[in-house]
Image (cartoon, coloured by chain):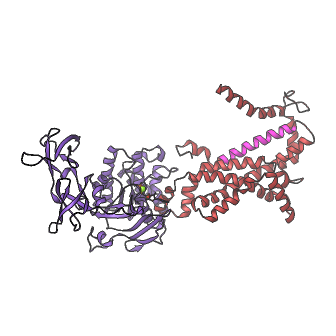
Chain colours: A purple, B red
């Protein structure tokens, strides 16, 4: 487990936050199993996973609110297991903000400084700074329940950052904002975290958000880390079928291996009489059932000329902000995203789809995993 | 139709009080409604009675102390029961709530036996202990409800900001329970101030409470002074509510735009 993890960061540097084989059972179910994770100083790591994959549980373990059953959590070389939450110096924003309802915005943000016995003038100055940075200055005297979701979210962030923690954990900070606000706040958060230089883990179940914000992203599923890497690595070199399916809403279809080429680490597959190429992570013997993943923007469609047997026909066009998407139907149904200026192919036109082999990924279909590991 | 019913209900609920107040103002010699002429003479009579003044003082002191003690103890118990659920706290909860299942008269007889066995006399301590037994279950139930509705992550947030468990208790948990604490304190005050079924076993001549004294008066001399005494009981319980209200800062809490529990 550890080797795959360390691959994401510079190996000579000691990671600031180190999780090793963290395991947690809740109500008899393994919620986290063997989670190992390195976060380097100043990094913004995305923790991406579907609902129920254990993201919040992992943050609770790092924060000290949940005991771990096995494994260890270290910050800057120090084991945190015996350290109570209030001595960990970890800032957290919670999924539901968890602001103090009985305190004003000013006192919410000043709460941590007050615990640290910061003198009144300095406290006022530092809270004032946070208010200014997060655009909350006019709201200092208001109570949380009179704030909008976006404002509450910023107060939560200001409150956590005001004490300048050594690590920030952000649990889906944008989940409760509407789409337009989410885009804006996303970059505000990135700027703020960058400018403070604080090491952070940003939890989300939204892949776009993780990719837009984070240098590295860990994909969690059913309490296990599936892959850690840069957005490009997750897109172009998915470690397994789950990551391939989760990232970029690809075309997915089943096929069987016709030929494996060890030199290019790719296969030719066949599905009904349609053959194509895809890269693989491990050698596969001919006849193996595989699942093939290819994202719509990697699929090129060309009008079939008279020589080629046409196996596909254009079924429909969908207009998207980023261009147009063609649905083509043949032995399988595929989506192909085309730039808007591309040639128009009328409905019913005979076409041939193709893609660069390294842009399609095939994984052997494994026998159904044990119930606990499914999500 | 609905409105008529509401009006009837309000009239029915307030009528006894109104009648007592009016009857207490009579200038006549006997219990009569409507009153014959208006005067405050029966208030003079009742206040001239040193036994009544003693009983009033006892009632007020008893209800105030019971209220403060019952609510403090219940708050601590509620926090450990809700936040540190274990077999031990479940047992404590069951024990503290158990008096709810026993009629006050039965509890009274039990305590009387116990006090008799240890040779304890009626005084503020023994009365307060008795009242705590019957009021803690109510306060505890109210406070458990108020705590159960609170978001635990708010406490986690406080801890992540460096708040010690003690700071979390005083700066985060208790302030959020304010409405619950106030409600519990007022309920306990009224329960204690009103109680007859239990208290009747705990008092003795020379040391009694107003409700018990009123019972005695109703048996012996049926004079309008009993009405005056009842009105004083009513006013005193309002006074208690207002006092508690000030103590916990109910109004300040409501009229800022702070949360209302
Ligand atoms: N106290 C508990 N007892 C039993 N199961 C629990 C408990 N807390 C969490 N779980 C289970 O653990 C799993 C992971 O929960 P967690 O809250 O960590 O998920 P998450 O990834 O944060 O999901 P979301 O995106 O919905 O917030 C879920 O299946 C959940 O039902
Ligand atoms: Mg969660």
Q: How many marks?
A: 0
Judged from the image, the quadrant occupied by ligand 2 is bottom left
Q: Quadrant of residue A201?
A: bottom left
Q: Is residue A87 left or right of residue B175?
A: left
Q: Quadrant of residue A238?
A: bottom left
Q: Residue at left 22%, top 68%?
A: A283
Q: Quadrant of residue B2?
A: top right
Q: Is residue A23 above or below residue B10?
A: below
Closer to the camera in the image, A314 or B186: A314
Q: Is residue A261 above or below residue B54?
A: below
Residue A315 within the magenta-colored segment of the rendering: no
Location of the N terminus of chain B by quadrant is top right
Kindly give the residue lying farthest to the right in the view shown. B220
Residue A258 horizontal/vertical position (percent): 18, 62
Kindly give the residue lying farthest to the left in the view shown. A307
Chief secondary structure of the magenta portion: helix
Q: Is residue A205 left or right of residue B222?
A: left
Residue B241 within the magenta-colored segment of the rendering: yes
Residue B130 horizontal/vertical position (percent): 78, 56
Closer to the camera in the image, A74 or A335: A335
- Magenta residues, start to end: B225-245
Q: Is residue A255 left or right of residue B257?
A: left
Residue A172 horizontal/vertical position (percent): 38, 54
Residue B82 horizontal/vertical position (percent): 59, 58
Q: Is residue B83 visible?
A: yes
Q: Residue at left 67%, top 30%?
A: B6
Closer to the camera in the image, A277 or B80: A277
Q: Is residue A361 left or right of residue A181?
A: left
Q: Is residue A64 visible?
A: no
């Amino acid at each position: 487990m550890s080797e795959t993890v360390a691959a994401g960061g510079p190996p000579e540097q000691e990671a600031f936050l180190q999780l090793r084989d963290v395991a947690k059972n809740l109500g008899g179910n393994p919620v986290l199993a063997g989670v190992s994770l390195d976060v380097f100083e100043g990094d913004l790591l995305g923790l991406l996973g579907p609902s129920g994959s254990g993201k919040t549980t992992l943050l609770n373990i790092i924060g000290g609110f949940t005991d771990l059953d096995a494994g260890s959590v270290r910050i800057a070389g120090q084991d945190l297991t015996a350290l109570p939450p209030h001595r960990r110096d970890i800032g957290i924003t919670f999924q539901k903000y968890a602001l103090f309802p009985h305190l004003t915005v000013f006192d919410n943000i000043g709460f941590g400084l007050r615990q640290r016995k910061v003198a009144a003038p300095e406290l006022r100055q530092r809270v004032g700074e946070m208010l200014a940075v997060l655009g909350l200055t006019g709201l200092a005297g208001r109570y949380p329940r009179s704030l909008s979701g976006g404002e509450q979210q910023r107060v939560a962030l200001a409150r956590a950052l005001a004490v300048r923690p050594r690590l920030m954990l952000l649990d889906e900070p944008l989940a409760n904002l509407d789409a337009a606000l989410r885009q804006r706040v996303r970059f505000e958060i990135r700027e703020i975290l960058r400018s403070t230089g604080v090491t952070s883990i940003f939890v989300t179940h939204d892949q776009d958000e993780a990719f837009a914000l984070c240098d590295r992203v860990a994909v969690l599923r059913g309490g296990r880390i599936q892959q850690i890497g840069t957005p490009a690595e997750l897109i172009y070199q998915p470690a397994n079928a789950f990551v391939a399916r989760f990232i970029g809403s690809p075309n997915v279809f089943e096929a069987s291996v016709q030929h494996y080429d060890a030199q290019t680490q790719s296969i030719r597959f066949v599905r009904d009489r349609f053959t194509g190429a895809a890269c693989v992570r491990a050698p596969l013997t001919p006849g193996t059932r595989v699942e093939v993943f290819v994202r719509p923007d990697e699929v090129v469609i060309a009008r079939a000329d008279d020589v080629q047997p046409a196996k596909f026909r254009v079924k429909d066009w969908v207009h998207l902000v980023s261009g147009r998407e063609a649905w083509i139907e043949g032995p399988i149904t595929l989506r192909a995203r085309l730039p808007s200026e591309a040639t128009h192919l009328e409905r019913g036109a005979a076409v041939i789809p193709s893609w660069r082999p390294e842009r399609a990924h095939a994984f052997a279909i494994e026998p159904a995993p044990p119930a606990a590991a499914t999500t | 139709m609905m409105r008529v019913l509401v009006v009837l209900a309000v009239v029915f609920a307030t009528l006894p009080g109104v009648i007592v107040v009016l009857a207490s103002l009579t200038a006549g010699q006997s219990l009569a409604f409507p009153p014959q002429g208006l005067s405050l003479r029966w208030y003079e009579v009742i206040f001239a009675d040193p036994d009544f003044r003693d009983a009033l003082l006892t009632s007020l002191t008893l209800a105030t102390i019971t209220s403060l003690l019952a609510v403090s103890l219940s708050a601590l118990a509620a926090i450990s029961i809700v936040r540190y659920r274990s077999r031990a706290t479940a047992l404590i909860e069951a024990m503290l709530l158990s008096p709810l299942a026993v009629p006050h008269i039965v509890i009274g007889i039990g305590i009387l036996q116990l006090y008799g066995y240890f040779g304890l006399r009626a005084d503020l301590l023994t009365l307060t202990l008795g009242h705590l037994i019957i009021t803690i279950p109510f306060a505890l139930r109210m406070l458990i409800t108020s705590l159960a509705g609170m978001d635990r992550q708010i406490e986690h947030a406080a801890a992540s900001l460096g708040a010690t468990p003690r700071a979390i208790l005083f700066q985060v948990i208790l302030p959020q329970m304010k409405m619950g604490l106030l409600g519990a304190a007022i309920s306990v005050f009224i329960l204690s101030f009103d109680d007859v079924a239990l208290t009747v076993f705990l008092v003795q001549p020379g040391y009694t409470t107003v409700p018990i004294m009123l019972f005695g008066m109703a048996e012996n001399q049926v004079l309008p002074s009993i009405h005056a005494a009842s009105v004083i009981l009513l006013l005193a319980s309002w006074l208690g509510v207002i006092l508690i209200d000030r103590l916990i800062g109910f109004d300040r809490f409501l009229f800022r735009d702070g949360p209302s529990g």
